[in-house]
Amino acid sequence: MAEQLPQDASYISLETFKRNGDGVKTPVWCAPVGDEIAVFTEGSAFKVKRLGRDPKVRVARCDVRGKILGSWHEGTGRVVVSAQEEKNAYEALHKKYGWIMWLTDVMSTLSGRIKRRKIILLKLD
């Protein structure tokens, strides 16, 4: 049986890299958008800062706690600046996660965090 692609999983482990080359792994939700994978995060998260300096990433299927469930895939990541790309990413995330994503948006709106969110698009090699 062929391995499930990372973007088909409920969670992926997103690994970004520090200046010294050490990887930092974070479990995130993801959704396919064309030939890229969309994830969202807090705009001030260190992964956003690390991607601004080094676009290299690795991703693997994982569970909610980050336990790796598949093989690692290398690629690049970028923080979205286009309103249209952001809209497409949110549509894909809402389609995949449904009411859970809606509830996440409601809670983020109530707390004021939704304004600080960033979309990251990943392109696997």
Image (cartoon, rainbow, N blue to C red):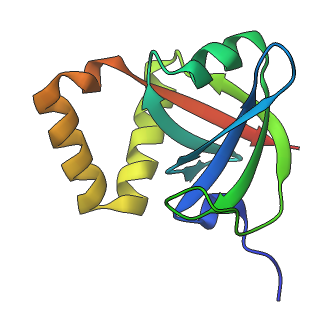
Q: Nearer the viewer, residue 91 or 30?
A: 30
Most extreme residue toward the left is 110
Residue shown at the point (62%, 54%) measured from the top left: 12
Where is 71 relative to 32, above or below? below
Where is 101 relative to 113, above or below? below
Where is 98 relative to 81, above or below? below
Residue shown at the point (76%, 39%) measured from the top left: 123
Q: Nearer the viewer, residue 107 or 32?
A: 107
Residue 7: which quarter of the image?
A: bottom right
Residue 52: which quarter of the image?
A: top right
Most extreme residue toward the bottom is 1
Residue shown at the point (43%, 61%) measured from the top left: 96
Q: Position of residue 23 (x, y in %)?
A: 78, 33
Residue shown at the point (30%, 61%) measured from the top left: 98
Q: Tell me if 124 is positioned left or right of 115 in this view.
A: right
Quarter holding the N terminus? Answer: bottom right
Q: Tell me if 98 is positioned left or right of 52 in this view.
A: left
Q: Position of residue 19 (x, y in %)?
A: 81, 13
Counting every numbered tag in the picture gives: 0
Q: Nearer the viewer, residue 121 or 59?
A: 59
Where is 113 relative to 101, above or below? above
Quarter holding the C terminus? Answer: top right
Q: Tell me if 110 is positioned left or right of 66 in this view.
A: left
Q: Position of residue 22 (x, y in %)?
A: 82, 28
